[in-house]
Image (cartoon, rainbow, N blue to C red):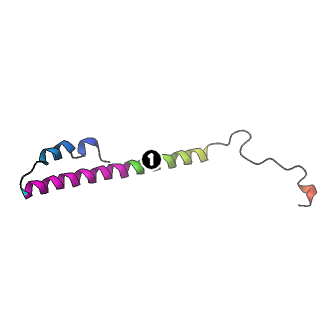
Amino acid sequence: MVQAQDMPSLSACKELANGETTQELNEFRKCLRNYQESLQTARKQALIKRRYEGSMRVVEGSTAPPAPGGNAPPATPNASANGR
């Protein structure tokens, strides 16, 4: 996972913002692209983590013993008397 210390700093890009040559401006653009890519990667990884944790909660909830009374529908009285 991308950690905050692994991401390029936006302040580092700001230092390049006042470039006067084409080379300096290209370095600024490259810095911004790298920063944007690292943000997108961090967002994707956070989404994957949330999905995983949500799935684990669902799995843990489905393996838990049923509560007393459960979720079963109420039994119909005399179901056999109705010819079924």
View extreme (top): residue: 68
Nearer to the camera, 19 or 61? 19
Type of secondary structure dominating the magenta stretch: helix
Could you tell whether 27 is left or right of 49 in the image?
left
Residue 9: tell me if it is visible. no
Q: Is residue 84 above or below residue 15?
A: below
Q: Residue at x 53, y 45 (%)?
A: 57
Q: Where is residue 44 in the image (x, y as percent from the top left)?
A: 37, 52
Tally of marks: 1
- The residue lying toward the viewer, choosing from 30 and 61, is 30
Q: Is residue 57 left or right of residue 42?
A: right
* Structural crowding at the residue carrying mark 1, measured as other residues with C-alpha within 10 Å and reported as few (<14), some (14–19) or many (≥20): few
39 or 26, nearer to the observer: 26
Image coordinates for residue 63, horizontal then vertical, percent: 60, 46
Q: Residue furthest left?
A: 21
Element at label 1: helix
Residue ranking furthest to the bottom: 83
In the image, is residue 62 part of the stretch drawn in magenta?
Answer: no
Q: Quadrant of the C terminus?
A: bottom right
Residues in magenta, as a range: 22-45
For the point 32% across and 52% down, the residue is: 40
Residue depicted at x 72% and y 43% = 70
Residue 26 percent coordinates (x, y): 13, 57
Q: What amino acid is at disc 1?
A: Arg
Residue 11 visible at all: yes
Residue 32 belongs to the span the image colors magenta: yes
- Residue 20 position within the rendered picture, expressed as x and y whole percent measured from the top left: 6, 52
Q: Mark 1 points at which residue?
A: 50
Q: Is residue 28 left or right of residue 4?
A: left
Give the residue drawn at x 6%, y 55%: 21
